[in-house]
Amino acid sequence: MQGKLALVSGAAQGIGASIALALGEQGVIVAALDLQAEALAQLAHPNIHPYPVDLRSSLAVNEVVARIEAELGAIDILVNVAGVLRLGAICNLSLDDWEQTFAVNTHGVFYLSQAVAQRMMPRRAGSIVTVGSNAAEVPRMQMAAYAASKAASSHFTKCLGLELAEYGIRCNIVSPGSTDTAMQRQLWIDESDRQKVIDGALPSYRSGIPLRRIADVADVTAPVLFLLSDAARHITMHNLCVDGGATLGI
C-alpha cells in the first residue's frame, strides 16, 4: 500500500489512532480525521496529516474530503472508525443520547463513505473498511443505541460494497468485541472489571470471551490492514468479527 492515500476517521485515539499509525508506517499517506484537534496533533508521524472535522455535519464532511483531495491527492483508502457510546436502558434513554449516537456512528459513516465513494468511482479503484462492533450481532443490555447504530452502519457498508463492486471498489467491515480502549474503560470501575468482561455475566446475558483475553488495538488493526490490502482483493461485503469468540461465531 506504499504511496497510497488513506482517510481514517476517529484517528485521535484508540483503534483509529492505531490504524492511522500502522498505515503511516507502511508508507501510506494518511489524512487523519477527528473532532479532537489537540489529540490529532499528537499523532507525530511524517505521513499523517491532521484534519479536524465534525462528522455529524454533511457539509463539513464534504468540505474536508474536497480539501484532502486538493491538498494530498486522490483518496485510495477509507477507514470509518469514529464512534461514540451512550449507555442506558431503552425506556430511560434520552433523545439526545439516541440522536448523537446515530449522528456519529451511522450518519457520519454515510456522509464520509458517500463523499469518498463519489470520487473513487470514476477512478474505478478503492478500498473501504468500516469498523463496526460485535454488539451489532447480538442484543446487549443498556447498549441499544450503540448496537443499533453499529448494525445500521455495518449493513450500510455491505450495501455500499454491492453498489460499488462493478467499479472495482471493495467495502468490508471489521467488528471488534471488547478492546482495551478509552471507550471500553469508561464501562469499568477499576482494573478488576477486565476479568469480569472475560468471564461474562449471566444476569446481563453476556457469554464472556472464550479466548480468555480482551483484545488490544493491534488485534483489530491487523485485520483492517489485511482487508484494505491487495491480499484481500477478492473479498468484499464481508464482516470479520474480531472478538475472541464472544459472539460464539454468529
Image: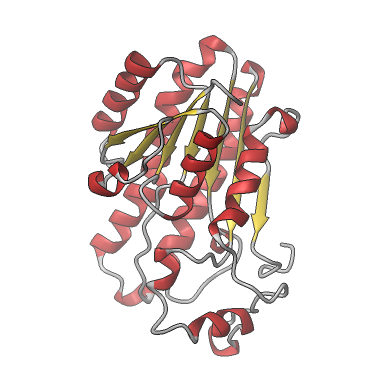
Q: Nearer the viewer, residue 221 or 236?
A: 221
The quarter holding residue 100 reads bottom left
Q: Residue at x 59, y 82 (%)?
A: 205
Would residue 119 appear left or right of 248 to someone viewing this image?
A: left
Q: Position of residue 51 (x, y in %)?
A: 29, 33
Give the vertical position of 153 relative to 120 (above or below): below
Which residue is nearer to you in this view: 91 or 148? 148
Q: Quadrant of the C terminus?
A: bottom right
Q: Indicate left or right for 106 with 54 as reference.
A: right
Q: How is the image coloured?
A: secondary structure
**Location of residue 169 (image quadrant):** top right
Residue at position x 29%, y 55% from top? 99
**Residue at image point 64% right, 73% down:** 213
Pinpoint residue 35: horizontal percent, then vertical percent.
27, 45
Q: Is residue 213 left or right of residue 39?
A: right
Can you say whether 26 is above or below 203 in the image?
above
Q: What residue is shown at x 45% (from left), y 69% (from top)?
A: 184
Residue 25 in the image, given as x and y percentages of width and height: 54, 36
Task: State the residue lying farthest toward the bottom.
Answer: 203
Quadrant of the rendering where the N terminus is positioned: top right
